Image (tube, grey):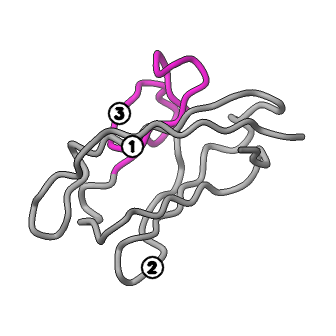
Amino acid sequence: NTFARDSDITITFSEAVDPDTVTVNTGTSTTCSGTIWISDDNFNTCIPITVGGPTSTDNITFTFNPVADELASKRQYKIRIKTDDVKDPSGNSHKSQNDISFTTVT
């Protein structure tokens, strides 16, 4: 998968999730925190995300915006979805953790 380094990241879950359980590390911290992580060093550190939230009224699709200029060109990144912590509206955890890899383009 390739990805423009200044694009938003969209994640679509297989079912509705409680938006309060979908969180990100904000500000300037590179500590991996929240339920959505983006990293280029196998999650030793994470890229801060400035905005994140549902983009559909059914709470299935969420869009995230990494801090400007944090994603370098032609580098491989991983997104980790900590699905044990992401819950559906009934409070049930998703089944398994997911890591998704992508490479940025110029």
Of 34 and 96, the residue lying toward us: 96
Residue that badge 2 annotates: 56
Tell whether label 1 touches label 3 (CB within 8 Å).
no
Tell me if residue 40 is in the magenta stretch.
Answer: yes
Against 50, is 33 above or below? above
**Mark 3 neighbour density, 10 Å: few (under 14) some (14–19) many (20 or more):** some
Most extreme residue toward the bottom is 57
Quarter of the picture containing the N terminus is: top right
Identified by mark 2, the residue type is: Ser
Main SS of the magenta part reads loop
The quadrant in which residue 35 appears is top left
Give the mark, 1 or 2, whose residue is nearer the N terminus: 2
The residue at 70%/44% (across/down) is 68
Q: Which residues are magenta?
A: 23-47
Identified by mark 1, the residue type is: Ile
* Image spot of residue 29 (x, y percent): 47, 29
Residue that badge 1 annotates: 81
**Mark 1 neighbour density, 10 Å: few (under 14) some (14–19) many (20 or more):** many
Say what secondary structure mark 3 lies in.
Answer: loop
* Image spot of residue 44 (x, y percent): 46, 15
| Distance from Cα at disc 3 to Cα at disc 2 | 24 Å
| Distance from Cα at disc 3 to Cα at disc 1 | 11 Å
Identified by mark 3, the residue type is: Ser
